[in-house]
Amino acid sequence: MKFSEMPYKRVDMDELTEKLSNLLKKMENAQSADAQYETYIEFRDIVLDSSTMASLSYARHTIDTRDEFYDKENDFYDEKMPLLQMLVLQYYKAFISTKFRPELEEKMGKLWFDNVELELKGFDERIIEQMQQANALGSEYKKLLTSAKIDFDGKVVNLSQLRAYQLSADRDIRKSAYEKRSEFFLQNADKLDEIFDKLVALRNEMALKLGYKDFVELGYIWMNRNSYTKEDVARFRAQVKKVVVPFTTKLHEQRRKNLGIDKLMYYDEDIFFAEGNPAPKGTPEEMFENGRKMYNELSSETAEFMDFMLKNELFDALAKEGKAGGGYCTVFPAYGAPFVFANFNGTSEDVDVLTHECGHALNSYLSKDLEIMEYRHSTMDVAEIHSMAMEFFTADWMQLFFHDKTKDYLYMHLAAALIFLPYGCMVDEFQHEVYANPGYTPAQRKELWLRLEKEYRPHLDYGDDEFLSQGGVWQRQSHIYERPFYYIDYCIAQVCALQYRIWMEEDRQAAWNSYLELSQKAGSKRLTELVKEAGLVSPFEDGCMQNVVDGSSEILNELNK
Ligand code: ZN
């Protein structure tokens, strides 16, 4: 069904509550494992229908935030979703305490029960109030950042529009764009400190209430970490520091040479070529036509997927007045339909919509028929392998978008993937320290950030920029405010995606088959099992990082010739 024709009706919370409580009784009276499982299927369909409505409402609200109808609907779900979550958890709690559990574990997989237990450990009615307060602070942060009105180039721009100037081929323009950004953050420094200070205190309070030592433990539960510990993550970061940082320092030196400058400054970050970074050619319509061609040629599975997406209008990619910023991929489970939202801006990020976001969407499409709905969703570390590896598998079609700049694009893309790793690990280490030391003052957090930058990104030179030299850069990283401990997932996934990139050089077909299978399995296994079955080396294993760096280095040398 086409997106525009999908009917919408507000979820009736009273009806839903009644349905679920009847179902709960039915389940508790079930006389066999099969009878109990049947109630799960009913439960699943009720939840999927409700979440289809909530997703439709969200998508239509973000497409036009001025639309009053969907604006109200969006407020409704903001308020009611925690209630739905509570009902779901009540059902889960009863479901796992059943005497039929051994048979049901056999049928549904032990992982389902382990995941549910983990989820229950991270939630309790006693912390609902703090959760709501934290959500409100997250919204306050978002509003503060989106409210930025910056005078630049004779126009009033917001932070994401300013970002385009930070990437300008003209060094002076870049510099003044960065200065304008610093000015905004300096003006709001106290407010940003205050919001984060409150968030740390609230998160610490919730963790203590639930009986944890600090928020690190609770944060891991909230990220559904079911196959590795904070010690594994610490070893991962140590490998990045030891192996990746020296290598990316060389990549930055290469950047300096390409730019033809004596010294890299902070306003040269993310710039790879003196004439500017490669940008895609063609109109958005032409880009989607190229996207269709690319996925048609890539494999029969991706061909079917892309036809489905285009036929059912499941992309909304053009920037329009009233449209919310950013990009995302969601799903309307009742129709087995993924949906991709984006704002094309003429940079290479537009191509990411057709590669990265489509990697997520393909995964939703391939896993839409898994009977156990929870298995359709992977943990974020796995989900980002689907998207980041797709960025690499589509490399052979990049000439459709970048023409004579294809080689430059491929070099920049791979180099940026490696350069990201130290940054991502730094964000993660910062959060571990902050939550292990909830008494830190805002000044101590900034000192910590500066210390970590010296370890992870020694090439940085902030000149006389006051904001950057004070160690406040992390305040523009929304994940730190809104999604604690999310960031390392990108790094773990990137190390797996890079392994696919290297594997492609040796045996493209084998790499692709492995990827497809990984994506089909979605969340039905743990990250560590999925990676092993896919024939990849665990990112936590010693030596993995060295292999990734060596393999990538060879490809980069070829591309930089
Ligand atoms: Zn992603």
Image (cartoon, rainbow, N blue to C red):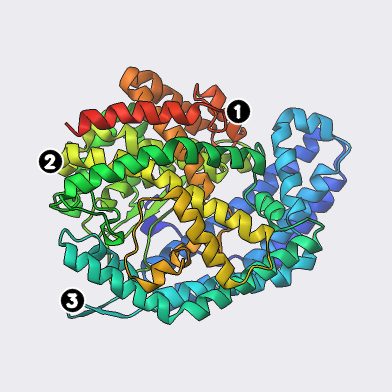
Q: Earlier in the sequence, mark 2 or mark 3?
A: 3
- Local crowd size for mark 3, using a 10 Å CA cut-off: few (<14), some (14–19), many (≥20): few
Q: Compute the Cα span from label 2 to label 3.
A: 30 Å
Q: Position of residue 232 (x, y in %)?
A: 63, 38
- Residue type (three-letter) at the residue carrying disc 3: Asp
Observer-nearest residue: 285 or 494? 494
- Residue type (three-letter) at the residue carrying disc 1: Glu
Q: Position of residue 11 (x, y in %)?
A: 60, 65
Is residue 533 visible in the rendered image? The answer is yes
Residue 390 tag number? none
Q: Earlier in the sequence, mark 1 or mark 2?
A: 2
Pointers 2 and 3 in contact (CB under 8 A)? no
Q: Compute the Cα span from label 1 to label 2.
A: 40 Å
User: Which residue does the numbered mark 3 point to in the structure image?
Assistant: 153
Quadrant in which residue 412 is drawn? top left
Observer-nearest residue: 113 or 356? 356
User: Which residue does the numbered mark 1 point to in the structure image?
Assistant: 529
User: Which residue does the numbered mark 2 point to in the structure image?
Assistant: 403
**What secondary structure is found at the residue carrying circle 1?**
helix
Is residue 77 visible in the rendered image? The answer is no
**What secondary structure is found at the residue carrying circle 3?**
loop
Question: Which dot, 1 or 3, sits closer to the camera?
Answer: 3
**What secondary structure is found at the residue carrying circle 2?**
helix
Q: Compute the Cα span from label 1 to label 3.
A: 52 Å
Q: Position of residue 104 (x, y in %)?
A: 78, 33
Quadrant in which residue 136 is drawn? bottom right
Residue 443 horizontal side relative to residue 321, left or right: right
What residue is at 41 percent from the left and 75 percent from the top?
185
- Residue type (three-letter) at the residue carrying disc 2: His
What residue is at 35 percent from the left and 77 percent from the top?
183
Quarter of the image with the C terminus is top left
Q: Position of residue 449 (x, y in %)?
A: 51, 60
